[in-house]
Amino acid sequence: MKGIIGLLLLLSIVACGDKTHNAKIAPQDTIYNVKDSKKHETVLPASNAYGFDTSYNTSTTHKPFMVTGFFNPDNTLDTAIIIRHKVTGKDALFIKHGGTNQTFSIKTGKDVGQNFDNLNWVGEFKIIQKGTKIFDDVINGEIVGEDQVRDNKKITLQNDGIFIHEDEGGGGGIIYFKNGKYVWVQQD
């Protein structure tokens, strides 16, 4: 009799299953902050599979729209994606550090110390390898070669960088991770 009851119990557990593995997360998670015994609700923007908020899509005009490299020093592969805002049509750069929840959005040049409104002008999008020597190649409004740049103004990339540039002539730069943020070096 104990064997039959045990078998029935086992079958009912298997039939019910572990429902925790099938839990789905709502597109908009809610967090609560408790302050002065009052509940304040903050709704976080929904995000897609890549991790950026759903007011953006991956760019359909950039080939490639995504590159991977080792942008920070943790030796875990990171991802950079050109994304387009669904309403404004402005392109931005979304960077996700692999193995962490750390993300960065470069929506305008101000995010990297430059003066551009969006990244719609980007034609070339690729990785610059760790160890590459880079420098700002515009001095006093003139394009210069490496031999015209003082050694103390040259940077050897400690991690991979992200090269973005206009297709035909124009300008661009290298975005790289330094002291916890992304910075820019002009490349015309």
Image (tube, rainbow, N blue to C red):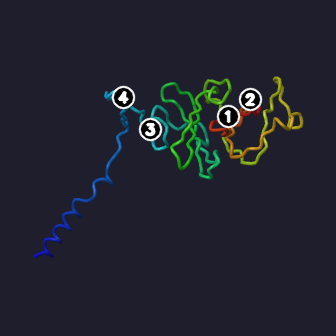
**The label number, if any, that marks residue 183 in the structure image:** 1
Rendered residue at 68%/26% (across/down): 114
The residue at the point 51 percent across, 43 percent down is 101
Farthest-out residue, right: 147
Q: Residue at x 57, y 31 (%)?
A: 91
* Real-space CA distance between mark 4 and mark 3, rounded to the nearest whole angstrom: 27 Å
Name the kind of residue labelled 3 in the image.
Ser
Q: CA distance from mark 3 to mark 1?
A: 25 Å
What residue does disc 4 label? 35
Measured as percent of width and height from the top left, residue 169 is found at 76, 31
What is the number of the mark on residue 122? none
Q: Is residue 7 above or below residue 146?
A: below
Mark 2 or mark 4: name the one nearer the start of the chain: 4
- Check disc 3 and report its element: helix, strand or loop: loop
* Mark toward the start of the polypeptide (4 vs 3): 4
Mark 4 or 3: in front is 4
Residue indicated by mark 2 = 170
* Label located before the other in sequence (1 or 2): 2
Label 3 vs 1, first from the N-terminus: 3
Q: Amino acid at mark 1?
A: Val
Location of the N terminus by quadrant is: bottom left
Q: Which residue is mark 3?
A: 47
The percent position of residue 27, horizontal first and vertical second, equals 37, 38
Secondary structure found at label 1: strand
Distance from the alpha carbon under mark 1 to that under mark 2: 20 Å
Crowdedness near tag 3: few (<14), some (14–19) or many (≥20) residues, C-alpha within 10 Å: some
Q: Between residues 85 and 115, which one lies in front from this camera angle?
A: 115
